[in-house]
Image (cartoon, rainbow, N blue to C red):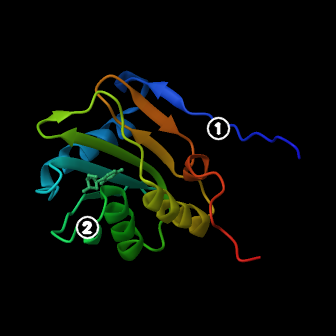
Amino acid sequence: MQLKEIKIYYRSAEINDFDEQMQRLIEKAKQQTELSYAPYSNFSVGAAVLLEDGTVVCGNNQENIAYPSGLCAERTAMFYTNSQYPDIKPIAMAVAARNGKDFLENPICPCGACRQSLLETELRYKSPIKTILYGTKNIYVINSIADMLPFAFISFD
Ligand code: THU
């Protein structure tokens, strides 16, 4: 048996490290938390997707009394993006979360189901989606969804 290693890189950043377009994307993700429907968890997540033509598409978490029927912000945003702009490549996504009133100090990372769904989009457009995970103290930048999901289910071969 051979021990193998998978290594991923991500960046820790602060808001001034981003250009104006990316700062706007982060701001959109933050604003989206206000539109979230999260009466069960009181945990509001916002996501903003940047397309290669500059269009920004937003979404937020939508909960349901039958808990698993709800949907995370990332999938709400990306499914809407894919449904409305199938011909334009998504190139980046920003995510922000509030536990009640306050934004979290440290970013949250997309759940496993979101990673699998986002990876599908990355593979579909054959282009990495840069993910910016916002926190008031730390902001993480991950260059592609694939980096967040090693051992992904991607092939039937
Ligand atoms: N949630 C998201 O929208 N995105 C994540 O990355 C993690 C969790 C939502 C699902 C649920 O509505 C609430 O946050 C609490 O888990």
Left or right relative to 28: residue 38: left
Q: Amino acid at mark 2?
A: Gly
Q: CA distance from mark 1 to mark 2?
A: 30 Å
Q: Is residue 3 above or below residue 56?
A: above
Foreground of the two, 16 or 6 = 6
Tell me if residue 57 can be seen: no
Label 1, on which residue? 8
SS assignment at label 2: loop
| 85 versus 38 height, above or below | below
Residue at image point 11% right, 37% down: 101
Residue at x 20% of width, y 71% of height: 66
Asked whether mark 2 lies closer than 8 Å to ligand 1, one says yes
Look at discs 1 and 2 and give the one toward the viewer. Answer: 2
Reading the image, the residue beneath label 2 is 70
Query: Could you tell whether 83 is left or right of 119 in the image?
Result: left
Vertical position of residue 96 compared to residue 119: above or below: above
| Residue 148 position within the rendered picture, expressed as x and y whole percent measured from the top left | 55, 47
Query: Which residue is outermost to the front?
Result: 1
Identify which residue, 49 or 101, lies in the foreground.
101
